[in-house]
Amino acid sequence: MRTIIAIVLASFVAYAATQTASWWPRQTTPNYATFCKQTGYTCKNCKEVVLCIQYGDRFSEYPIESCGGNSTCSNGICTIGPNPNCDPVEEVNNATFRCRTTGMYPDPFDAQLFHYCVKADYPNEKDEVLDHYEERCDCDHVYNPRTTFCDRPISRDNRNTSISKCKYQGESGYLKENPSLYYICQYHYESLYPFQYKCDNGKRYNPYLYLCEYIN
């Protein structure tokens, strides 16, 4: 459907460009966009998807879709997944762990510490609430994100976690031990923190697209 819309609009704009200026009705003057860099779908803001089409030496924008509910625009489509450009940054006191999705996660700073994020059952809450629990491995072992057990003897090589220190907002990556777990660096106060998420159903994280996908 989107391909058909793009072809029709492109054909219309190409035809209109060959006509005299007097042919254009006043109310159909192209809506020139300042943010379009190339022809295709893009995000005008966190809620609006537009189609950019080149018109002479300038670009015009055409509204395609408004992202509803909890979805936001990312790479020209509406998505419910994490979106570092639009997700609100939660307040984190003393950089303590905060649950974003259900699952088990390693602590980003302490290799022996790990966290449970469990869906809470609060009947009066409209939005999903996650309860947070944390545990520490015995003194001679560290947490293994692949097996979810404390089954790795502590050593010089695994004393530090596999989550890199955040360098910039929006930086993301997957855990080398378990590529279905990933982090996105976001600001809280004046510091960056690697908030962790989980891909469902065997998907792996693609840090270039900020998406979970099946990888053969």
Image (cartoon, helix red, strand yellow):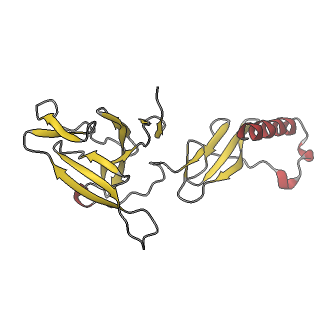
Residue 194 in view, yes or no:
no
Q: Position of residue 19 (x, y in %)?
A: 90, 38
Q: Position of residue 15 (x, y in %)?
A: 87, 36
Towards the viewer: 129 or 66: 129
Q: Is residue 36 left or right of residue 204?
A: right
Q: Position of residue 44 (x, y in %)?
A: 61, 49
Q: Residue furthest bottom?
A: 124
Q: Quadrant of residue 163?
A: top left
Number of callouts: 0
Residue drawn at the location 45% of the way across and 65% of the way down: 127
Q: Is residue 131 left or right of residue 158?
A: right
Q: Position of residue 175 (x, y in %)?
A: 31, 36
Residue drawn at the location 74% of the way across and 49% of the way down: 31
On-image quarter of the N terminus:
top right
**Position of 130 relative to 179 (above/below):** below
Towards the viewer: 199 or 92: 199
Towards the viewer: 102 or 185: 102
Residue 72 in view, yes or no:
yes
**Position of 150 relative to 44 (above/below):** above
Q: Is residue 13 left or right of residue 167?
A: right
Q: Residue furthest left?
A: 139
Residue drawn at the location 89% of the way across and 52% of the way down: 25
Residue drawn at the location 65% of the way across and 35% of the way down: 38
Q: Is residue 56 left or right of residue 120?
A: right
Q: Quadrant of residue 146?
A: top left
Q: Residue furthest top?
A: 216
